[in-house]
Amino acid sequence: MRQYRAARDWLYTTNTELSSASRWHMTVKLFRLLPRVFQNMYWIVVLLLPLPAGAATTPPNSTPLLVAIGDVHGDFDDFCSILQRVGLIDEQRHWTGGNATFLQLGDLIDRGPKPREVLDLMLSLDEQSAKAGGHVVALLGNHEMMNLMGDLRYVTVGNYASFVDSESENRRQAAFQKYFEWRKAHPQLLAELNQPVLPETEAEWMTRHPRGFIEHRAAFSPTGIYGRWLRQRFALVKIGAVIFLHGGINPDLASLGLDQINDRIRGEMNQYDEARQYLADENVLLPFFTLQEAVAVAQAELIAERKQRAKSNDTRQARIEQFLALGGWLCVREDGPLWYRGYDQWSDEEGAPRVEKILAAYNATNIVVGHTVQKTARIRPGFGGRIMFIDTGMLSSYYHGGKPSALEISEAGKFTAVYLDQQVALPGAKSAQSTLK
């Protein structure tokens, strides 16, 4: 009972200090401590009661407390292989991680052949793990944000093809007709376009919008199956004394709290969705316009409206200006948490004090990041283990020599790099020990 009271008191005193993204992990920790109090009683019951037919006989503590995996980029097969390797799924891709926490650091999609299968697996594991007492924490990467906003530079024809169904060609033809009618209704806007971003012929439009394109955009919309799920994800999370995110926290942003960063990213996404919906309702944009098309059209519309002699719609101009300010938003900036690569570019001498500044700002011991592919295709501890770089270029068809990997963190705070053929204990900062206890 002393262990239970200590865990209860610890949870009560720290609960108010935790970010909203992390608080539930602390609750999980309490319930992980409870079985230790009744461990002897548990084994007596296990010995006396027969196992039901077909019951799993997983040894206790057979999975680590936490597993983090970096960028997947549509490499479904290798993603499944590394998940099986660390014991989080079986060959049927069902959750076997028990009460473990699985963190995925973003960039599930783009480039690779099976991004939709990757997303479907994540949605399934999210549900399955919760029923088993575990957790799946999927964080936003820059490629998730790109797809949500319509920046589709890395979406392949094959990716679109995975969304094709029997009605795809009809939807495609209907979308072109809407586009054709939109062009006829906006001669002044089209005259102000300073670059040829919009297709001018049906053949060009069809080339840019292969079958499955319209369905892809619908799936990533605020009401789409993937769009809804991704918009609920955080940009970063702190578990114990370890911060996880896709890119990194710029030292210049360390004055912002973790909750503030998450709130800003989500707020910007909501602002973007609201602006797009408003401009669609005003027939300035069409729902399937890419980000690049939407920005160019909004700029041209603003110029056209300002040139009109009649009194302009000040509210509409203000909404367009707000939309066009997105280049300064944290979710798309190169120094933002989804895009930052500074950690990998610093020398030990210049980076060490910067890393300590960030860690001190958040009372953290380590930061785990993806986004920046490691040339050695190995998980790399940097700055005395304070920064863990875990993007090893899983999609080897794109990243030459890349391989799937996972970072395990034990309850004692020990870091282990896991590959399909081996696992390697990683040196970590002394202060990192017992960070998850």
Image (tube, rainbow, N blue to C red):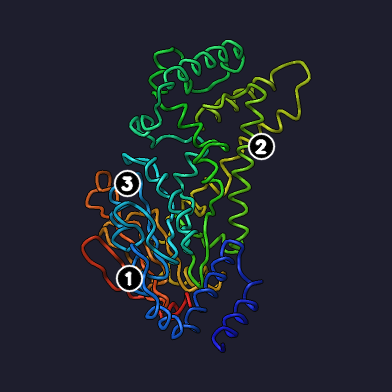
Q: Quadrant of the N terminus?
A: bottom right
Q: Which mark is residue 322?
A: 2
Q: Is residue 382 visible?
A: no
Mark 3: which secondary structure?
helix
Query: Residue drawn 51% across and 46% down?
Result: 230
* SS for callout 2: helix
Is the residue 412 above or below the residue 21 in the image?
below
Kindly identify the amino acid type of the residue bearing the numbered disc 1.
Thr
Where residue 232 sits in the image (x, y, percent)?
56, 49
Q: Badge 1, how many Cα within 10 Å: few under 14, some, many 20+?
A: many
Amino acid type of the residue that numbered disc 3 sits on in the rendered structure: Phe
Closer to us: mark 3 or mark 2? Answer: 3
Dot 1 or dot 3, earlier in sequence:
3
- Neighbours of disc 2 within 10 Å: few (<14), some (14-19), many (20+): few
Q: Residue at x 48, y 40 (%)?
A: 146
Could you tell whether 246 is left or right of 393 in the image?
right
Q: Residue at x 39, y 23 (%)?
A: 211
Look at discs 1 and 2 and give the one toward the viewer: 1
**Would you name the residue on which mark 3 appears?**
76
Sequence-wise, the earlier of marks 1 and 2 is 2
Disc 1 to disc 2, C-alpha distance:
46 Å
Amino acid type, mark 2: Gln
Measured Cα–Cα span from mark 3 to mark 2: 38 Å
Which residue is the site of mark 1? 416
